[in-house]
Amino acid sequence: MRVLRKEQGEALQYQLYEAGGIAHLAPGYEKIIRLGAEGIIAEVEAFEAQTTDPEKLEFYRGVKISMEALGEFGDRYAAEATRVASDERDPVRRQELEKLRKFVPACLVTEPPAFTKRSNV
C-alpha cells in the first residue's frame, strides 16, 4: 500500500475540490434547460406540500432561492445585452445582442421547452 505524504494528499484533495466545482454545487443543467427556474420552483413547491421534514423544507427553500437568483441573473444579463446593443454600430453584432437579450431570460426562467436542444447549447 502506498502512503501519501501530507503535501501529496493536500494536492489530491485540492484537485478533487476543483473538479467538484465552486461550493460543492452540481447544478442539473439538463433539468434547468428543460424546466427553467420557474418550472423547478413549481416542482419544489409540490415537494414542499408533501412533507413536514424540516431538513427537506430547508433544502427546498435553498433550491427556490437559487432559482430566483438564476432568474435575476438572466434579467441582469438581458439588461446588459440591451445596453451594449444600443451602443453597437455593427448591425450584425447588434442583432446578435438582441437575440441574446431575448434568449437568456427565456432559457433560464420561463420558456425552455419552446427552444430546441440545439439553441439551448
Image (cartoon, helix red, strand yellow):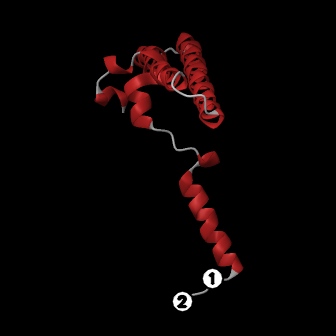
Q: Residues within 10 Å of mark 1 (few under 14, many from 20)?
A: few
Q: CA distance from mark 1 to mark 2?
A: 10 Å
Q: Quadrant of residue 117?
A: top left
Q: Percent position (x, y) of residue 39?
A: 45, 20
Q: Which residue is at 61% across, 33% downward? A: 53
| Residue 12 at least partly seen | yes
Q: Which residue is at 44% across, 23% downward? A: 36
Q: Residues within 10 Å of mark 2 (few under 14, many from 20)?
A: few
Asked whether 101 or 48 is in front, the reply is 48
Q: Percent position (x, y) of residue 103?
A: 43, 18
Mark 2 falls on what kind of element?
A: loop
Residue 60 vs 15, above or below: the answer is: above
| Residue 94 at least partly seen | no
Residue 34 marker: none
Asked whether 57 or 51 is in front, the reply is 51
The residue that disc 1 covers is: 4
Which residue lies most toward the right here? 6
In the rendered image, which quarter contains the C terminus? Answer: top left
Q: Percent position (x, y) of residue 45?
A: 52, 21
The residue that disc 2 covers is: 1
Q: Which residue is at 55% across, 10% downward? A: 86
Q: Nearer the viewer, mark 1 or mark 2?
A: 2
Q: Percent position (x, y) of residue 27?
A: 50, 39
In the rendered image, which quarter contains the N terminus? Answer: bottom right
